[in-house]
Structure formats: structure tokens, C-alpha cells
Image (cartoon, rainbow, N blue to C red):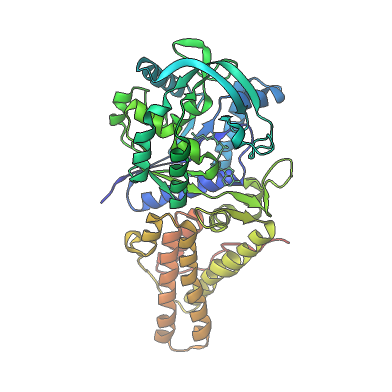
Amino acid sequence: MAKNFYITTPIYYVNASPHIGSAYTTVAADVLARWNRLLGNRTFFLTGTDEHGAKIEAKAAEAGMEPLEFVDSIADKFKTAWSALDISYDGFIRTTAGNHKAAVARALQFLHDKGDIYLGKYEGLYCRGCEQFKHEKDLVDGRCPDHGTVPETVSEETYLFRMSKYADELLEKIKSDEYRILPVERKHEVVSFIEREGLNDISFSRKNVGWGIPLPWDASHTTYVWADAFLNYLTGLGWSGDPASVKDLEYWPVDIQLMSKDILRVHATIWPCMLLALGVELPKKLFIHGFFQVDGQKMSKSLGNVISPDEMLARYGVDATRYLVISSAVFGQDGDITWARLDEKYSSDLANGLGNLVSRVSNLLEKNGIMTGLQAIDPASSKIAGLFQELKLDEILKTVWAGLRHCDEDLTAKAPWKMTDRAEIESVLLPIAQTILDSAYLLQPFMPVVSDRIIRQFSEKQVEKNDPLFPRLAS
Ligand code: MSP
């Protein structure tokens, strides 16, 4: 039966252009969105950009630009990158959009009226890279472990969100899986964090950051960038900021929120507590995937080892790039990529794998004038449907490739090119053609263009030779 399916990526900071890390989350979300569409589910896939806060303000100043001009230019780069990667998003939310800002102001006013936001003081450390408040114990040698920078000391009047009030309720919902965090190790990590440290009220406004949404009842403060950012998951559906109107949103609650471990803790604490305070149903599932490193090192501009989607696209083309990023790591665990390994995988799995098999089989079919006119498998009844349910994206590819390899071996062993009896040739080629067609059908979410070419080629009655699907790499 058709269902509604809503999936989100984090909204990315516009302090830098998209790299292969943000591309990984976005391609994975795209695969899941396309799979749901293939099943006939009504699907909404939201991504976007996180454009306020001290970090962006400083970056714009560095570039000698007005913040709005700066964020416009980077948001465009994200849109261009996603279109080059064939990302089929249904909504692209920017936190500087008027409707988003108005909804955030309205929601915060509601929390303020309710007494869940109150005036206080914040004294402590702030890491601009994370846009998060830090404790001494979060630091390594006095520095933020993620950014290597010394946090600034902040002492200012601030409005605090009464997060502590919702800690018990949240813990219960996480433990019972009503609010599901996957893989399960991530759930345990969050549960033990909340049990160990509890949840403290958290600063929700900044007095000295101009680039943000002013609080509606006190314009001398701007909204804390994470409070602003989380609400994108609702405003991206057209929400007005009125908690009572969430029930009118067709796609809420969200089915899957994808992200990596760097932002798990904030997503599993501040965000659901905001929803509890607003009286809004929690997301169904957070899925936390791993972090990509390049050749054993964190990808960073200063190390000069950033792999950009553009470089991969130029070398491998769009479908192969999508295949390579998803197959480079077990979904949910860390991965490490190197150009050498990407090249190797491109050649073995794509150029000499799928591409070569399709070309051998279509040549033989054409040469022998064999009509195919095959029907593809029903995706819902395939064995990969269960793997999709468990979000085992890399395993789906492994399963499909095992089938393709088997075809290759079968072809070589039976050598139909040596046969003369047409019925015998057909009995070898048709089952192989069927597996290729079924594989292409199931690969549509991963490789939309190549799959489409194969489907057209193998479901038409007369199979014709075609240009190679995956050209050999120039060395
Ligand atoms: N703006 C916040 C998110 C707000 S959502 C309400 C933010 N932005 S970010 O640009 O830093 O994006 C972080 C996310 O990008 C990660 O959680 C992950 O999805 C993706 N990745 C960024 N670098 C990555 C790797 N090196 N490897 C894998 N994913 C990575 O945090």
C-alpha cells in the first residue's frame, strides 16, 4: 500500500563549498527517496543550507562581502553541485528565506509565552566552528577536538530554553524506540549521555551576533543558530510556526533524518526537546552514518586533501560517482577513501563489471537476432526490499553485484558464442538478460541514468549495441 515518506539531510553550513562528505549524506538520502518513489510512496525529500550565525558572518567579512550576498553565492554552489549529482530533492530550504524566518520567530514567541524561554545569563565557552557551547571536559588540551581551535569565552545576557524540563520524557521516548536512533550503538551513546549528565537549560539567543533572526519580543538578541536551523525540517514543508497547524502538514512526522555523528548529540537532545515543548510529534527515526576520511586523515582545506564532488564527477561521471560514494563505506560506519581505491573500484565493478557484462550480452543477443521483450522484477518483492528497510545501502550494491558476477561466470563457463543451436543459445542468454534487467531496475535509485539506458535496451524487443556505459579511465 502506498504511504507517505519524508526524508531530510542536515542543512549544510555555507561557510564552504560542498565536499564529498556532504555529498555522501545527500546521495544516500536521494537513493532512499528514489526507492520510495519506485515503490509508489508519496515522497518528500528536503535538503538545504544553514545560513545564519557567527561563523558565516565572519566568513562573509573575510570574503569582503555582505552576508546575504555571500550566502546567496554559496547556496547556489550547493544547488549546482546537487543538480550535477542528480539529486532529486523536492524542497531546498534556506534559513534566510522570509517564510522560514517568520516561522522561527513565531515558534520562539510561543515558547517564550509558555515560559519555556526565559532571560538569564550565559558564562562559558563557545566554539564557532561547531556553533556550540562547550564545557572544559569537551576539550582536548583546551581546544575543540573537531575544529582544533580554542573556544572563545562568552559572558552575556541570554535567553535560555528550558530543556531540563523535557529530559525525562525524551529519555523515555529514546529508550522505548518511539524516537528511534540508529544504528543501535548511537542510541546507547545518547542514552548514556543523558543518564550521565542530564540535560541543562541551553542558551537560545546571542546578543553580539548580528547575523541571525531577531527575537520577536527583544530585538537586541538574535536566535541561536541551531534553534533556527532545526526548525527547517518543519518550515521546509511550508509550516507557518504555529504549533497547532503541524497536524495539517501532510508529511509530518518525518520518517528518516540522515546525518553523521558530529551532529548526533544536538539532534537527539535540543531538537526533540524543542518539539516536545511545541507539542509536536517527534521524528520517527534518526539514522547516523559514519565519517569519511581521505587516506586516513580528516578531510580539511589546510591538509589540501578535500575531495570535491566536481573532481569525482569529472573523472567518473554522475552515476559512477554515486555508486562509488555509497559503496565506499558500510552505511553507519566510518569510511576511508583514496583516489587509487576509487579508480580500482570504478574499473573492476563498473567498466569491467556491469559495463562489460551489458556489452557482451547485448552483442550476443544482437548477433543472434534474439528478441527479449522481458519484464522487470517487482521491486517490492525483491530481496533487496528488506535491505532497504534496514538502510543497508552498501549491502544492496554488494548483493546486486554478486548476481552480476554470477552472470559473468555463467557466460564464460557456458560460452554461448561457441554454440550453434539457437534454442540452446537463448536458454543461456535469456536468464542472464533477465538478471541484468532486474539489476538495472533495482539500481535505479543509485544510478538513474545508466539504469534507464539498460532498462530501455533490455526490455525492448530488439536489443541493440550501445556506447560503453562506463568508459575506461584515462590514466
Ligand atoms: N548546519 C549544521 C546542521 C544543521 S541541521 C539542522 C551542520 N552543517 S555541516 O555543513 O557541518 O554538515 C554536517 C553534516 O555533513 C554531517 O552530519 C554529515 O551529514 C555531512 N558530512 C560533513 N563532512 C562529512 C564527512 N567527512 N563524512 C561524512 N559526512 C560528512 O552541521
Q: In this view, does 143 lie to the left or right of 93?
A: right
Residue 210 in view (yes/no): no
Q: Which residue is drawn at 49% across and 39% down?
A: 265
- Of residue 116 and residue 449, the one placed in the foreground of this image is 116
Residue 260 in view (yes/no): yes
Q: In this view, does 67 lie to the left or right of 269?
A: right
Name of the residue lying farthest toward the left? 1
In the image, residue 302 lies at what x, y percent? Answer: 74, 40
Name above or below for residue 112 compared with residue 168. Answer: above
Quadrant, the C terminus: bottom right
Name above or below for residue 193 compared with residue 415. Answer: above
In the image, residue 308 lies at what x, y percent? Answer: 65, 46
In the image, residue 313 lies at what x, y percent? Answer: 62, 50
Q: Which residue is drawn at 60% across and 68% down?
A: 348
Please tell me in which quadrant of the rendered image residue 118 appears.
Answer: top left
Where ligand 1 lies, by image quadrant?
A: top right
